[in-house]
Amino acid sequence: MSDILHAWAVAPAAVGACCLAADRARVRPPEVMASVLMLLAMLDAGLSRLVAPVWWTAMLLAGAVTLAIWRRPRQRRPPRVPALMTMHTTLGMIVMAGLQVGMAGHAGTSGHAHGLDPAPVLIGAATVYAVLSVGVIGRMPARLDRGQIGAMAASVVLMAVATW
């Protein structure tokens, strides 16, 4: 069941990446690259598992930090991307990184595990992210931005449900 939910989570992520790429008024290569990185991580985790989830987690966290540094407010010229959009994308990458680790727990077939189950924490983080996304959607004037934020939130929620 979690594989089916994971596959369904890829669709909104692809829609979100397309929304970013389709916005020709404001070309945003860093955000497009972040979206593609999240999409690749989800595709690999759901289909092939060529890269270990811990490496995807590291890449997503590094991407989040890089995006935050790249889009930091500069003093000479204002950024073309709303700060709220950068914050949402960065938080999304962090939540996705956690979900990658959570999904890795379902890969084993032995049924034997040590430690606490991270699923409740991950589902809580995804829920908070989804609620914040609804607030961000209400503040975005551009339709493509609202579409990208909604698609990313839907993808995170579906991945969180798949971890359960």
Image (spheres, rainbow, N blue to C red):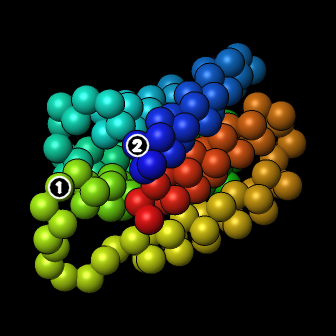
Label 2 element class: helix
Residue 38 or residue 162, whichever sits in front: 162
Going 44% across and 65% down the picture, which residue do you hit? 164
Mark 1 lies on a secondary structure that is loop
Q: Amino acid at mark 2?
A: Asp
Count the marks.
2
Q: Is residue 150 visible?
A: yes
Q: Quadrant of residue 146?
A: top right
Q: Which residue is mark 2?
A: 3
Indicate which disc, 2 or 1, sits on the residue closer to the N terminus: 2
Q: Nearer the viewer, residue 36 or 53?
A: 53
Q: Residue at x 62, y 23 (%)?
A: 18
Name the residue beneath numbered marker 1: 109
Asked if residue 43 is positioned above or below residue 81 in the image, the reply reads: above
When the figure is inspected, residue 11 is found, relative to residue 66, above or below; the finding is above
Type of the residue with mark 1: Thr
Horizontal side, residue 112 vs residue 162: left or right: left
Asked if residue 78 can be seen in this view, the reply is no
Q: What is the x, y in percent for residue 75?
A: 58, 51
Q: Where residue 9 sits: x, y (%)?
A: 53, 41
Mark 1: give few (<14), some (14-19) or many (20+) Cα within 10 Å: few
Res. 157 mark: none
